[in-house]
Image (spheres, grey):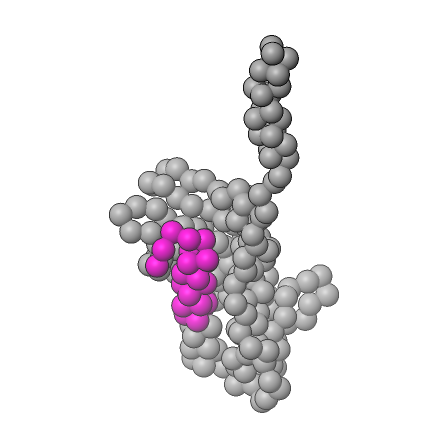
Amino acid sequence: MYRMARLVLLLPLVLGLSGCGKSKPIHYYTVQLPEAPTLAASTHPVSLLVGTIGGGPLYRDTPIIYRVGPNQIGVYQYSQWAEPPVELIKNKLIRLLSASGDYQSVAAFGSNSEGRFVLRGRLYNFEEVDGANIAGLVSMEFELYDRTSGKVVWTHYYSQSEPVQSKEIPSVVAALDANLNRGLKEVADGLNQFFSAHPVGKS
């Protein structure tokens, strides 16, 4: 009788431990890229290079970040970006500028890159902000460096919040992506205005 009672008590413990071995799947998210560019005559005879997008350690990693209050941040354990945000933004910016048709060419800056102008940036915020209302915050800054003169000739700072429709991660990602679209469009429009006001020869 004692042995049977001990078996009954042990059975739920064994079943509970067997369930602990199952790990929760990680869900990965990304941003939408603009359509691939079509070959056409460019507005500006400029070979534009897109350099590094800098950012803090968390933005060079893949977790999706949330902020609670002005000084506390955390990360979602089972929801991550497919690539670090600094890379997602760089790739999206290159595609956006290429698709605009404004430039002779747009490419990532590398050791063998040819081009007079390099667009560089820094990401300050790319995160969910929790409070009375949930929002997706994007803050970033860009500068255009002229390799010929060795000077920064244009800068642009962007910081906006986008309302999130629900607490679910897909809604947070959609809000951040919409906000990023708006910010990168400002960058593209600003660059176009700069080169329209300061025409250059073949670079």
Q: Residue furthest front?
A: 1
Say whether residue 172 is magenta: yes
Give the residues drawn in magenta, as a range: 165-187
Residue 181 point in image, percent of width and height: 44, 67
In the picture, the quarter occupied by the N terminus is top right
Which residue is at a point 48% across and 54% down the rendered structure image?
A: 123
Q: Residue furthest top?
A: 2
Which residue is at a point 42% across and 58% down the rendered structure image?
A: 171
Residue 15 point in image, percent of width and height: 60, 30
Q: Nearer the viewer, residue 123 or 31?
A: 31
Residue 168 can be seen, yes or no: yes
In the picture, the quarter occupied by the C terminus is bottom right
Looking at the rendering, which quadrant does residue 139 occupy?
A: bottom left
Q: Nearer the viewer, residue 14 or 199?
A: 14
Quick check: 174 left or right of 163? right
Say whether residue 67 is magenta: no
Q: Residue furthest left?
A: 132
Residue 46 can be seen, yes or no: no
Secondary structure mostly seen in the magenta stretch? helix
Looking at the rendering, which quadrant does residue 183 occupy?
A: bottom left
